[in-house]
Amino acid sequence: MMDPIVFETLLLAIEREAVPLPEAGPILVLNAEPGPWLTRLPKDRLVLRTSYKPHHDALKAAGFNVLAVDSVELPEAQLTIIVPPRQRDQARAVYARAMLAAPEGSTILACLPNTLGGKSGQDALEALSGNSDSLSKHKCRAYWCVKHAADVDEELAQDWIDFDAPQLIEPGLWSRPGLFSWDRIDPGSEMLADSVPEYTKGIGIDLGAGNGFISREILANCPQVERMDLVEAEYRAMICQEQTMAPHAARCTMRWADVLKDLPPATYDFAVMNPPFHTGRADNNELGRSFIRAAAATLRNGGTLWLVANRHLPYEDELTRCFKAVEMIEDDDGYKIIRADRPKRFK
Protein backbone atom coordinates (compact mmCIF):
# COMPACT_ATOMS: atom_id res chain seq x y z
CA MET A 1 0.00 0.00 0.00
CA MET A 2 1.13 3.52 -0.73
CA ASP A 3 1.83 5.71 2.30
CA PRO A 4 -1.34 7.78 2.96
CA ILE A 5 0.74 10.95 2.89
CA VAL A 6 1.28 10.39 -0.83
CA PHE A 7 -2.46 10.66 -1.43
CA GLU A 8 -2.56 13.84 0.66
CA THR A 9 -0.08 15.38 -1.76
CA LEU A 10 -1.93 14.05 -4.81
CA LEU A 11 -5.25 15.46 -3.58
CA LEU A 12 -3.57 18.77 -2.78
CA ALA A 13 -2.97 19.26 -6.51
CA ILE A 14 -6.75 19.00 -7.03
CA GLU A 15 -7.76 20.99 -3.97
CA ARG A 16 -5.47 23.86 -4.96
CA GLU A 17 -7.03 23.67 -8.45
CA ALA A 18 -3.63 23.14 -10.06
CA VAL A 19 -5.30 20.08 -11.57
CA PRO A 20 -8.94 20.75 -12.50
CA LEU A 21 -11.57 18.35 -11.23
CA PRO A 22 -13.94 17.74 -14.15
CA GLU A 23 -17.51 18.88 -13.56
CA ALA A 24 -18.92 15.81 -15.29
CA GLY A 25 -17.92 12.46 -16.68
CA PRO A 26 -15.82 9.63 -15.30
CA ILE A 27 -12.66 10.04 -13.25
CA LEU A 28 -10.37 7.11 -14.00
CA VAL A 29 -8.03 5.72 -11.32
CA LEU A 30 -5.39 3.22 -12.49
CA ASN A 31 -3.66 0.79 -10.14
CA ALA A 32 -6.21 1.94 -7.61
CA GLU A 33 -5.72 1.34 -3.90
CA PRO A 34 -8.47 1.42 -1.27
CA GLY A 35 -8.32 4.08 1.40
CA PRO A 36 -9.96 7.20 2.79
CA TRP A 37 -8.44 9.29 0.00
CA LEU A 38 -11.04 7.97 -2.45
CA THR A 39 -13.89 9.32 -0.32
CA ARG A 40 -12.66 12.84 -1.07
CA LEU A 41 -13.43 12.35 -4.76
CA PRO A 42 -16.94 12.06 -6.28
CA LYS A 43 -17.64 8.38 -5.74
CA ASP A 44 -20.41 8.12 -8.30
CA ARG A 45 -18.02 9.20 -11.05
CA LEU A 46 -14.98 7.15 -10.11
CA VAL A 47 -13.99 4.26 -12.39
CA LEU A 48 -11.26 2.18 -10.77
CA ARG A 49 -8.90 -0.41 -12.17
CA THR A 50 -6.53 -2.71 -10.31
CA SER A 51 -5.04 -6.11 -11.04
CA TYR A 52 -4.31 -6.93 -7.38
CA LYS A 53 -7.01 -9.20 -5.95
CA PRO A 54 -7.14 -7.90 -2.34
CA HIS A 55 -7.50 -4.32 -3.59
CA HIS A 56 -10.00 -5.33 -6.26
CA ASP A 57 -12.18 -7.14 -3.71
CA ALA A 58 -11.95 -4.35 -1.12
CA LEU A 59 -12.95 -1.68 -3.64
CA LYS A 60 -15.86 -3.75 -4.93
CA ALA A 61 -17.03 -4.40 -1.37
CA ALA A 62 -16.94 -0.66 -0.68
CA GLY A 63 -19.31 -0.05 -3.57
CA PHE A 64 -16.93 1.48 -6.10
CA ASN A 65 -17.23 1.01 -9.84
CA VAL A 66 -14.31 -1.34 -10.53
CA LEU A 67 -13.45 -2.37 -14.08
CA ALA A 68 -13.31 -6.07 -14.85
CA VAL A 69 -9.75 -7.24 -14.34
CA ASP A 70 -9.50 -8.54 -17.91
CA SER A 71 -10.95 -5.41 -19.53
CA VAL A 72 -8.76 -4.17 -22.37
CA GLU A 73 -10.21 -0.77 -23.21
CA LEU A 74 -9.94 2.14 -20.79
CA PRO A 75 -12.85 4.58 -20.66
CA GLU A 76 -12.20 8.12 -21.82
CA ALA A 77 -11.89 10.43 -18.83
CA GLN A 78 -11.05 14.12 -18.48
CA LEU A 79 -8.99 13.21 -15.42
CA THR A 80 -6.92 10.05 -15.05
CA ILE A 81 -5.24 9.43 -11.68
CA ILE A 82 -2.37 6.95 -11.56
CA VAL A 83 -1.11 5.25 -8.41
CA PRO A 84 2.31 4.26 -9.78
CA PRO A 85 3.35 0.66 -9.17
CA ARG A 86 6.66 -0.10 -7.50
CA GLN A 87 8.56 -1.39 -10.54
CA ARG A 88 9.74 1.22 -13.06
CA ASP A 89 8.93 -0.59 -16.30
CA GLN A 90 5.48 -1.57 -15.11
CA ALA A 91 4.85 2.05 -14.09
CA ARG A 92 5.97 3.30 -17.50
CA ALA A 93 3.50 0.96 -19.17
CA VAL A 94 0.69 2.33 -16.97
CA TYR A 95 1.63 5.91 -17.95
CA ALA A 96 1.75 4.90 -21.62
CA ARG A 97 -1.65 3.16 -21.61
CA ALA A 98 -3.20 6.12 -19.82
CA MET A 99 -1.68 8.53 -22.33
CA LEU A 100 -2.94 6.67 -25.39
CA ALA A 101 -6.44 6.25 -23.93
CA ALA A 102 -6.85 9.81 -22.66
CA PRO A 103 -8.96 12.21 -24.74
CA GLU A 104 -7.58 15.47 -26.11
CA GLY A 105 -7.13 18.12 -23.45
CA SER A 106 -7.54 15.78 -20.50
CA THR A 107 -5.20 15.61 -17.52
CA ILE A 108 -3.14 12.70 -16.19
CA LEU A 109 -2.09 13.00 -12.54
CA ALA A 110 0.23 10.84 -10.41
CA CYS A 111 2.21 11.14 -7.18
CA LEU A 112 5.23 9.47 -5.57
CA PRO A 113 7.51 10.11 -2.62
CA ASN A 114 10.71 11.90 -3.60
CA THR A 115 12.76 8.97 -2.34
CA LEU A 116 10.84 6.50 -4.51
CA GLY A 117 11.09 8.19 -7.87
CA GLY A 118 8.88 11.26 -7.84
CA LYS A 119 11.17 13.18 -10.19
CA SER A 120 11.76 10.24 -12.52
CA GLY A 121 8.01 9.60 -12.62
CA GLN A 122 7.43 13.17 -13.75
CA ASP A 123 10.20 12.81 -16.32
CA ALA A 124 8.52 9.69 -17.71
CA LEU A 125 5.17 11.42 -18.01
CA GLU A 126 6.77 14.43 -19.70
CA ALA A 127 8.67 12.20 -22.13
CA LEU A 128 5.33 10.82 -23.30
CA SER A 129 3.29 14.01 -23.36
CA GLY A 130 5.78 16.79 -24.06
CA ASN A 131 4.65 18.76 -20.99
CA SER A 132 4.37 18.41 -17.23
CA ASP A 133 3.91 20.36 -14.03
CA SER A 134 4.24 19.45 -10.38
CA LEU A 135 3.93 20.46 -6.76
CA SER A 136 5.78 19.11 -3.73
CA LYS A 137 4.56 18.59 -0.18
CA HIS A 138 5.25 16.08 2.61
CA LYS A 139 8.45 15.01 0.78
CA CYS A 140 6.27 13.82 -2.11
CA ARG A 141 5.79 15.06 -5.64
CA ALA A 142 2.43 15.26 -7.40
CA TYR A 143 2.98 15.57 -11.15
CA TRP A 144 0.67 15.86 -14.09
CA CYS A 145 0.42 16.58 -17.79
CA VAL A 146 -2.23 17.60 -20.30
CA LYS A 147 -2.85 15.40 -23.33
CA HIS A 148 -2.18 17.16 -26.61
CA ALA A 149 -2.24 14.44 -29.24
CA ALA A 150 0.13 16.26 -31.59
CA ASP A 151 2.83 16.25 -28.91
CA VAL A 152 2.44 12.67 -27.66
CA ASP A 153 5.35 10.36 -28.39
CA GLU A 154 3.26 7.39 -29.49
CA GLU A 155 6.28 5.34 -30.50
CA LEU A 156 7.76 5.64 -27.01
CA ALA A 157 4.38 4.81 -25.47
CA GLN A 158 4.12 1.66 -27.57
CA ASP A 159 7.69 0.65 -26.70
CA TRP A 160 6.89 0.90 -22.99
CA ILE A 161 3.67 -1.08 -23.42
CA ASP A 162 5.44 -3.75 -25.45
CA PHE A 163 8.17 -4.14 -22.81
CA ASP A 164 5.47 -4.83 -20.22
CA ALA A 165 4.31 -7.93 -22.13
CA PRO A 166 5.25 -11.44 -20.97
CA GLN A 167 8.86 -12.27 -21.83
CA LEU A 168 10.82 -15.50 -22.00
CA ILE A 169 13.53 -15.00 -19.36
CA GLU A 170 14.98 -18.51 -19.64
CA PRO A 171 13.87 -21.58 -21.60
CA GLY A 172 10.27 -22.32 -20.66
CA LEU A 173 9.98 -19.59 -18.01
CA TRP A 174 7.85 -16.51 -18.74
CA SER A 175 7.67 -13.33 -16.70
CA ARG A 176 7.02 -9.60 -16.98
CA PRO A 177 7.89 -6.34 -15.20
CA GLY A 178 6.36 -5.94 -11.76
CA LEU A 179 6.33 -9.60 -10.79
CA PHE A 180 8.65 -10.76 -8.03
CA SER A 181 12.20 -11.22 -9.35
CA TRP A 182 10.67 -10.71 -12.77
CA ASP A 183 13.79 -10.84 -14.97
CA ARG A 184 15.76 -13.65 -13.28
CA ILE A 185 15.25 -16.75 -11.19
CA ASP A 186 15.17 -15.77 -7.54
CA PRO A 187 17.94 -17.68 -5.67
CA GLY A 188 15.67 -18.40 -2.72
CA SER A 189 12.96 -19.84 -4.96
CA GLU A 190 15.56 -22.00 -6.69
CA MET A 191 16.79 -23.29 -3.32
CA LEU A 192 13.23 -24.08 -2.29
CA ALA A 193 12.48 -25.96 -5.51
CA ASP A 194 15.67 -27.99 -5.06
CA SER A 195 14.73 -28.82 -1.46
CA VAL A 196 11.39 -30.47 -2.19
CA PRO A 197 12.15 -34.21 -2.35
CA GLU A 198 11.53 -36.14 -5.56
CA TYR A 199 9.39 -38.62 -3.62
CA THR A 200 6.87 -35.90 -2.71
CA LYS A 201 3.36 -36.96 -3.68
CA GLY A 202 -0.24 -35.88 -3.55
CA ILE A 203 -1.82 -32.52 -4.28
CA GLY A 204 0.20 -29.38 -3.63
CA ILE A 205 -0.50 -25.67 -3.50
CA ASP A 206 1.88 -22.85 -4.42
CA LEU A 207 0.99 -19.76 -2.38
CA GLY A 208 1.88 -16.53 -4.16
CA ALA A 209 2.99 -18.49 -7.21
CA GLY A 210 4.24 -15.54 -9.28
CA ASN A 211 5.36 -16.67 -12.71
CA GLY A 212 5.07 -20.35 -11.75
CA PHE A 213 8.76 -21.24 -11.40
CA ILE A 214 8.50 -23.29 -8.18
CA SER A 215 5.48 -25.29 -9.35
CA ARG A 216 7.12 -25.94 -12.70
CA GLU A 217 10.19 -27.39 -10.99
CA ILE A 218 8.14 -29.58 -8.67
CA LEU A 219 6.05 -31.04 -11.49
CA ALA A 220 9.15 -31.61 -13.61
CA ASN A 221 11.02 -33.43 -10.83
CA CYS A 222 8.39 -35.04 -8.61
CA PRO A 223 6.50 -37.62 -10.70
CA GLN A 224 4.22 -38.67 -7.83
CA VAL A 225 2.76 -35.19 -7.40
CA GLU A 226 -0.76 -35.47 -8.72
CA ARG A 227 -1.47 -31.78 -9.13
CA MET A 228 -0.17 -28.32 -8.25
CA ASP A 229 -2.65 -25.50 -7.63
CA LEU A 230 -1.06 -22.09 -8.22
CA VAL A 231 -2.62 -19.21 -6.27
CA GLU A 232 -1.60 -15.65 -7.10
CA ALA A 233 -3.10 -12.26 -6.20
CA GLU A 234 -1.56 -10.34 -9.12
CA TYR A 235 -3.65 -10.91 -12.24
CA ARG A 236 -0.82 -9.77 -14.50
CA ALA A 237 1.03 -12.95 -13.52
CA MET A 238 -1.65 -15.28 -14.81
CA ILE A 239 -0.68 -15.19 -18.47
CA CYS A 240 2.94 -15.85 -17.48
CA GLN A 241 1.85 -18.85 -15.42
CA GLU A 242 -0.19 -20.19 -18.30
CA GLN A 243 2.82 -20.13 -20.62
CA THR A 244 5.30 -21.39 -18.02
CA MET A 245 3.02 -24.24 -16.98
CA ALA A 246 1.89 -25.21 -20.49
CA PRO A 247 3.99 -28.44 -20.53
CA HIS A 248 2.29 -29.48 -17.27
CA ALA A 249 -1.21 -28.19 -18.03
CA ALA A 250 -2.82 -31.55 -17.21
CA ARG A 251 -1.34 -31.51 -13.70
CA CYS A 252 -1.98 -27.95 -12.54
CA THR A 253 -4.60 -25.29 -12.00
CA MET A 254 -4.08 -21.54 -11.81
CA ARG A 255 -6.23 -19.21 -9.76
CA TRP A 256 -6.36 -15.44 -9.29
CA ALA A 257 -7.13 -15.29 -5.59
CA ASP A 258 -6.28 -13.78 -2.22
CA VAL A 259 -4.22 -16.30 -0.25
CA LEU A 260 -5.45 -14.83 3.02
CA LYS A 261 -9.16 -15.20 2.23
CA ASP A 262 -9.85 -17.56 -0.63
CA LEU A 263 -8.26 -20.92 0.24
CA PRO A 264 -10.27 -24.07 1.00
CA PRO A 265 -9.72 -25.59 4.46
CA ALA A 266 -7.79 -28.83 5.07
CA THR A 267 -7.41 -29.69 1.38
CA TYR A 268 -3.75 -30.07 0.40
CA ASP A 269 -1.03 -32.61 1.08
CA PHE A 270 1.74 -30.03 0.87
CA ALA A 271 2.29 -26.34 0.29
CA VAL A 272 5.25 -24.34 -1.00
CA MET A 273 5.84 -20.65 -0.72
CA ASN A 274 8.30 -17.82 -0.91
CA PRO A 275 6.02 -15.47 1.02
CA PRO A 276 5.91 -11.76 0.21
CA PHE A 277 7.19 -9.37 2.84
CA HIS A 278 6.21 -6.08 1.22
CA THR A 279 2.85 -4.40 0.92
CA GLY A 280 3.36 -2.05 -2.00
CA ARG A 281 6.61 -0.30 -1.17
CA ALA A 282 6.59 -0.90 2.59
CA ASP A 283 8.12 -3.82 4.51
CA ASN A 284 5.43 -5.94 6.10
CA ASN A 285 6.63 -9.01 8.01
CA GLU A 286 3.09 -9.67 9.18
CA LEU A 287 2.12 -10.51 5.60
CA GLY A 288 4.54 -13.46 5.62
CA ARG A 289 3.18 -14.62 8.98
CA SER A 290 -0.34 -14.41 7.57
CA PHE A 291 0.75 -16.63 4.67
CA ILE A 292 2.00 -19.20 7.20
CA ARG A 293 -1.37 -19.21 8.97
CA ALA A 294 -3.17 -19.55 5.64
CA ALA A 295 -0.92 -22.47 4.67
CA ALA A 296 -1.60 -24.27 7.95
CA ALA A 297 -5.35 -23.84 7.48
CA THR A 298 -5.41 -25.17 3.91
CA LEU A 299 -3.21 -28.22 4.60
CA ARG A 300 -4.59 -31.59 5.61
CA ASN A 301 -3.84 -32.87 9.11
CA GLY A 302 -0.62 -34.61 8.03
CA GLY A 303 0.38 -31.93 5.53
CA THR A 304 3.76 -30.30 5.03
CA LEU A 305 4.78 -26.71 4.34
CA TRP A 306 8.03 -25.93 2.53
CA LEU A 307 9.03 -22.30 2.97
CA VAL A 308 11.94 -20.13 1.88
CA ALA A 309 12.64 -16.73 3.39
CA ASN A 310 15.41 -14.23 3.80
CA ARG A 311 17.43 -15.25 6.83
CA HIS A 312 16.51 -12.15 8.85
CA LEU A 313 12.74 -12.58 8.59
CA PRO A 314 11.26 -13.69 11.94
CA TYR A 315 8.93 -16.52 10.95
CA GLU A 316 10.01 -19.29 13.33
CA ASP A 317 7.66 -18.36 16.17
CA GLU A 318 4.67 -18.31 13.82
CA LEU A 319 5.67 -21.64 12.31
CA THR A 320 5.97 -23.19 15.77
CA ARG A 321 2.58 -21.79 16.72
CA CYS A 322 0.92 -23.22 13.60
CA PHE A 323 2.72 -26.57 13.14
CA LYS A 324 3.60 -29.49 15.40
CA ALA A 325 7.08 -30.01 13.90
CA VAL A 326 9.40 -27.38 12.41
CA GLU A 327 12.82 -28.09 10.95
CA MET A 328 15.47 -25.85 9.39
CA ILE A 329 16.50 -27.69 6.23
CA GLU A 330 19.07 -25.23 4.93
CA ASP A 331 20.59 -21.90 5.91
CA ASP A 332 22.87 -20.55 3.21
CA ASP A 333 23.61 -17.41 1.16
CA GLY A 334 21.18 -15.28 3.15
CA TYR A 335 18.22 -17.67 2.76
CA LYS A 336 16.68 -20.30 4.98
CA ILE A 337 14.59 -23.30 3.92
CA ILE A 338 12.15 -24.49 6.56
CA ARG A 339 9.95 -27.59 6.60
CA ALA A 340 6.89 -27.53 8.84
CA ASP A 341 4.73 -30.62 9.36
CA ARG A 342 1.29 -31.42 10.75
CA PRO A 343 -0.64 -28.18 11.14
CA LYS A 344 -2.25 -27.43 14.46
CA ARG A 345 -5.99 -26.86 14.53
CA PHE A 346 -7.39 -23.99 16.56
CA LYS A 347 -11.01 -23.76 17.64
Image (cartoon, grey):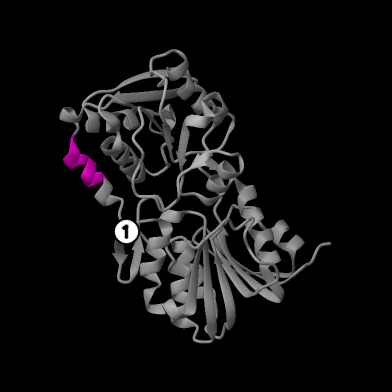
Q: Position of residue 328 (x, y in %)?
A: 64, 68
Q: Residue furthest top?
A: 16
**Do we see residue 281 in this rendering?**
no
Q: Residue at x 57, y 48 (%)?
A: 57
Q: Residue furthest right?
A: 347
Work out whether residue 275 or residue 332 is closer to the camera in this orientation and state it. 275
Quarter location, residue 242: bottom left
Quarter location, residue 59: top right
Helix, strand or loop for disc 1: loop
Q: Position of residue 204 (x, y in %)?
A: 57, 74
Q: Is residue 84 magenta?
A: no
Q: Which residues are magenta?
A: 153-160
Work out whether residue 184 or residue 245 is closer to the camera in this orientation and state it. 245
Examine the residues drawn in magenta and state their main secondary structure.
helix
Q: Position of residue 222 (x, y in %)?
A: 50, 83
Q: Is residue 159 magenta?
A: yes
Q: Position of residue 285 (x, y in %)?
A: 62, 48
Quadrant, the C terminus: bottom right
The residue pinned by badge 1 equals: 166
Position of residue 212 in the picture relative to residue 144 (left or right): right
Quadrant, the N terminus: top right
Quarter location, residue 61: top right
Name the amino acid, label 1.
Pro
Say above or below: 158 vs 310. Answer: above
